[in-house]
Amino acid sequence: MTDDTTLPDRDASDGPEPGAAVPDYELLDALTLEDPAQYRALFEETRQAIVALLRERAATISELAAALDKPKGTLGHHMQVLADAGLVHVVRTKKVRALEAKYWGRTARIFFYEHLDTGHGQRVLARAAAEVGQAEAEAEAAGLDVARVLDVNRRDVRIRAERAREFRHRLGELLTDFADEPRSGDQTYALVYGIFPSATPSLPTAEDEA
């Protein structure tokens, strides 16, 4: 299921203008993943990159292959896996001379899931750490103030479990708001959050000491 055209897949009229709704096609607000095949389809690096790009707008396999610097045949395979799992589908087509370009989109704005493969959180944080390291190195090499390029911090606080759940919910909403921002500017930014049990020691409360 590859787009075999070597012609440009979009012109200035395709895709959203800055400030337009994201993405540029109708889709469900949310989809709860219940089939193990959906988990296997989504939690793979290239396929996660595909569904992330499709939050911006519908795209052809040629466009996705160019953005991810991968062969169209490889992207076609990954798209088929996502489509079989019900996570993407063709949202529109466009005639390009004698060929029909297929534009793919997500089936839902948000995919909800309850069970993760062991190590998923580690992979997300490891990728973020690698990108932060690269950004720091590039800023230093350019003689820039690193603090003006990125902002990464951490706090370890002993709190009740219900408060941790409240913060997780608030951060999840912030992440969704961030992802729904209209696409504009020349730079892509990443927002990463994580709440997890910390091994950092803490002092007892005054009541405990008494």
Image (cartoon, rainbow, N blue to C red):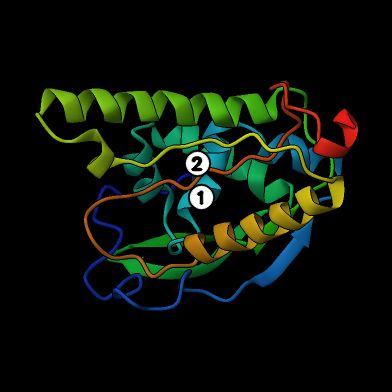
Q: Amino acid at mark 1?
A: Ala
In this image, 89 relative to 101: left or right?
right
Compute the Cα span from label 2 to label 1.
5 Å
To which residue does mark 2 refer?
Answer: 49
| Residue 120 horizontal/vertical position (percent) | 68, 29
Between residue 11 and residue 24, name the one nearer to us: 24
Vertical side of 184 occupied by 25: above or below: below
Q: Amino acid at mark 2?
A: Ala
To which residue does mark 1 refer?
Answer: 52
Q: Quadrant of residue 106?
A: bottom right
Contact between marks 2 and 1 (CB within 8 A): the answer is yes
Vertical side of 155 occupied by 62: above or below: below
Whether residue 4 is visible, yes or no, is no
Q: Dot 2, crowdedness within 10 Å: few (<14), some or many (≥20)?
A: some
Residue at screen point 77% across, 43% down: 38
Label 2 secondary element: helix
Residue at screen point 71% across, 23% down: 119
Residue at screen point 42% across, 49% down: 3
